[in-house]
Image: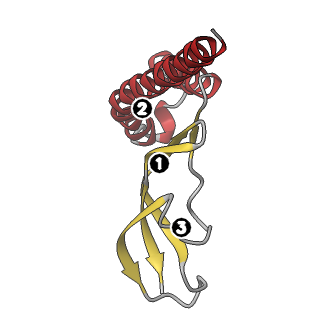
Amino acid sequence: MKRQMAEFDNFRKRTEKEKSQMFETGAKSIIEKVLPVIDNFERGLAAVPEEEKENPFVDGMEKIYRQMMTVLEEAGVKPIVAEGKEFDPNLHNAVMHIDDENFGENIVAEEFQKGYTYRDSVVRHSMVKVAN
């Protein structure tokens, strides 16, 4: 009887862990699909000329962008801060190297695409330029 109870308890724990992993995988999949939309919002807002910043349409787009970022942050999604930080292959994807005296060795000089983490795992690495 004790053996069967222990087996059932192990089965219950194993299924809970599998269920949690499936949820985590599903959440990451959805986040990966939403990130290009976030990138397009950022590109669009960055392309707005200074004299158009007060336009109600632009203001509305900025509010929607901030709301999306707030929702993602509440769900556990956070952007990876890369520029000016030391290059970390676990967080960054180096696509370019430059020789620049203004930066230290192995310092991220520029970020081409923002990376994100979900809880403690990387959803998308930051695409960066690294100084040698």
Residue indicated by mark 3: 88
Query: For the point 61% across and 85% down, which residue is it?
Result: 104
Q: What distance separates the C-alpha of mark 3 from that of mark 1?
A: 12 Å
Asked whether, in this view, residue 102 is left or right of residue 93, the answer is right
Q: Closer to the N terminus: mark 3 or mark 2? A: 2
Q: Closer to the N terminus: mark 1 or mark 2? A: 2
Residue indicated by mark 1: 115
Q: In the rendered picture of this protein, how many numbered marks are placed on residues?
A: 3
Query: For the point 60% across and 72% down, which residue is it?
Result: 86
Q: Closer to the N terminus: mark 3 or mark 1? A: 3
The mark lying in front, picked from 3 and 1, is 3
- Judge whether 36 appears above or below 54 on screen: below
Q: Nearer the viewer, residue 79 or 51?
A: 79
Residue indicated by mark 2: 38
Asked whether, in this view, residue 31 is left or right of residue 60, the answer is left
Measured from the top left, where is residue 41 in percent x and y?
Answer: 41, 31
Disc 1 + disc 2, Cβ < 8 Å: no
Neighbourhood count class around disc 2 (C-alpha, 10 Å): few under 14, some 14–19, many 20 upward: some
The circle on residue 90 is none
Q: Amino acid at mark 1?
A: Gly
